[in-house]
Image: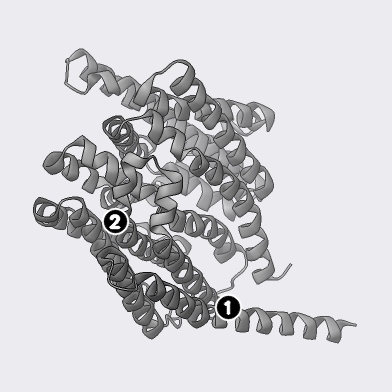
Amino acid sequence: MGRYKRLLSNTAILGVGTFASKVLVFLLMPLYTAILSAEEFGVADLISQTANLLIPLASVGICDALFRFTLDADDGDRKKIFTSSMTVLFAGSAVLALVCAALTFAGMSVSRYLPLITLYVIGANFHSACAHYMRAKGKTVLFAAQGIANTVLTIALNILFLIVFDMGSTGYVLSVVVADITITVGLFVGCRMWRELDLKSFDRTMLKNILKFSIPYIPTTMLWLITSVSDRYVVTYYCGTEAQGLYAAASKLPTLVILVSGVFIEAWHFSTVKDASSEERASFFSTVFKNYMSVMFMGASVLIAGSKILTRLLLADSYYSSWEFVPVLVIAMVFSAFSAFFGSIYFIEKKSMLSMVTALAGAVINVVLNFVLISKHGAMGAAAATLISYLATYAIRSYDTSHYLKFKQYHARVIINTVVLIAQSFIMISAVSYWKYMQLAILLFMLIFNGKGIIMTVMTVAKNFLSKKIKKS
């Protein structure tokens, strides 16, 4: 199978699983926002985001290392990698449980949420480890299927805990915890992963190499999350939990960009290791980035143009005013996606320390701007800070990764598309005269300007494929 075909195939398989899962979640957004008040939704979001910040700390970043090392390992080494990784996860979970228990007994103000946060972190880490181990072994269909199963179970439990038992924000979070633990047990037993776990295979040298790669991912992932969620805490501080709830709800729509990006990046990591030799890598990256960039910009333009409609359809009436944050956050997510793409170069080269340094730069910019802008402009300041920090991270990684891989980055196209999206957002938020017609004109321009390149690439790849077939025949 050709490298482009394999990339598209893996992306499609992961896409079916992920999109099916996320579409179900988005369809239930009206239910969530109807049952939970803005304050309750804000509390649930803060619990989830706090747990997400602790996930890489408790796992020592081992899940990324487990996936990367398994990709190019033989069967003998895979057992060593899996055993070493799971040992680290068990130890990290035990430490987290002890710390949270001590804080609970100390009577801290947030102690009532600590058991839930602990279970959330442990369940998420073991689920991620088992699922990504299966994906690294090439079982992409199974990986996608378990993702769908996890989401369906989460939604079913959400309905049970929110509607039947009326558990509020606790039920919203608990459904994720129970679903993660259930799917993890299913994978471990159903896929006989227990056979891969053998203490006799524990290898200190292997563990040392894994930790050397994974430890820098602790601050990297946490810094990435800080860039994503620090604004939630600052908005809560300056504007209250209700404003945070509105901002959190608005953030759900732009995550569609990250959804598309995340599906692709998962397949892309596999392809960059398996399908691209060092001689072909620059050409491969250039072609893929051009089309990836085009899809991101077209999707962003569609979301910005439809931000009012989507907010009306997916959120309760009391959340409608949150649409104003969507356009700016959409652009921010585009540059988050680009940063992830350039981060794949660090992944290939196993330069996790540089990934951490560039993430640190973005996080520092984000935190500083949050305090400066939110205090003056409220939640809109948070959206602006997020955009600027992701844009800065993209620029830094674009420059830094060129030391390891030089490929055409299409800076002019990035600038043109960005300027157009900013203009589109300004027109949308300001509601200038004839804004609907202007939105339509901009949307058509973005589709034509970016879509043309994708069509040309598809035709070129198809032509080369047919030429090879003809020569063989």
Task: Tell me: residue 249, above or below residue 106.
Answer: below
Dot 2: few (<14), some (14–19), or many (≥20) neighbours within 10 Å?
many
Q: Residue 48 in the image: x percent, y percent?
A: 35, 35
Check contact, mark 2 vs mark 1: CB within 8 A.
Answer: no
Is 128 left, or right, of 246 in this rendering? right
Is 223 left, or right, of 1 in this rendering? left
Q: Quadrant of the C terminus?
A: bottom right
What's under tag 1, amino acid-wise? Ile
Q: Quadrant of the N terminus?
A: bottom right
Q: Pick the residue in front: 412 or 134.
A: 412
What's under tag 2, amino acid-wise? Glu
The numbered mark at residue 159 is none
Q: Residue at 58% of width from left, 34% of height from top?
A: 152
Q: Pick the residue in front: 193 or 19.
A: 19
Is 103 left, or right, of 213 in this rendering? left
Q: Which image quarter: residue 397?
A: bottom left
Cα separation between marks 2 and 1: 31 Å
Residue matched to label 2: 324
Residue matched to label 1: 454
Q: Residue at 62% of width from left, 47% of height from top?
A: 17
Is 211 left, or right, of 20 in this rendering? left
Furthest residue toward front: 433
Is residue 94 visible to us here? no
Task: Tell me: residue 294, above or below residue 74.
Answer: below
Q: Which of pointers 2 and 1 indicates the residue nearer the eye?
A: 2
Q: Residue 219 in the image: x percent, y percent?
A: 29, 48
Q: Residue 178 in the image: x percent, y percent?
A: 49, 24
Q: How is the image coloured?
A: one colour
Q: Secondary structure at mark 1?
A: helix
Q: Pick the residue in front: 404 or 150.
A: 150
